[in-house]
Image (spheres, helix red, strand yellow):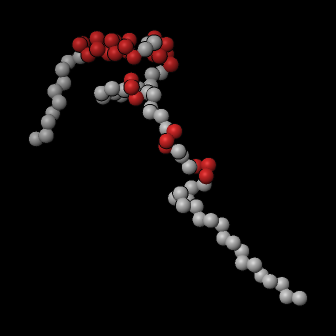
Amino acid sequence: MTMKTIAATKPKQDRSNGLKPEYRFDYAKAQPNRFARGMRGVSLAVVLDPDVARVFQDAESVNTVLRALLTTMPVQRIRGPR
């Protein structure tokens, strides 16, 4: 009795750049960044130390104090290219 060998079937090639199914992202379900609206113009994020953060409750209060401080500082000229 001769046993017939069956060719092993190769698994289908994954055509999504080799990513596993759990790593595929459906961009159709993506939503806009909910924080982008508050970041108009040029912004800089700064992390305050906990003791400073207790004093300032929001960005407006921090900006008010920094602007007041700026009025006391000497003007520094920005050097351009020579």
Number of numbered labels in the structure image:
0
At horizontal 83% and vertical 84% (from top left) the residue drawn is: 3
x, y (%) of residue 65? Answer: 34, 12
At horizontal 44% and vertical 27% (from top left) the residue drawn is: 35
Q: Which of 46 and 21 lies nearest the eye of the viewer?
A: 21
Q: Is residue 68 left or right of residue 26?
A: left
x, y (%) of residue 30? Answer: 49, 38
Q: Which of 75 and 54 lies nearest the eye of the viewer?
A: 54
At horizontal 15% and vertical 33% (from top left) the residue drawn is: 79
**Compared to 12, does 66 lie above or below?**
above
x, y (%) of residue 43? Answer: 34, 27
Residue ranking furthest to the bottom: 1
Q: Quadrant of residue 40?
A: top left
Residue ranking furthest to the left: 82
Q: Quadrant of the C terminus?
A: top left
**Compared to 38, does 17 lie above or below?**
below
Q: Quadrant of residue 6?
A: bottom right
x, y (%) of residue 58? Answer: 43, 14
Q: Is residue 70 left or right of residue 2?
A: left
Residue ranking furthest to the right: 1
**Compared to 10, does 29 lie above or below?**
above
Q: Which of 30 and 69 lies nearest the eye of the viewer?
A: 30
**Compared to 45, does 17 lie above or below?**
below
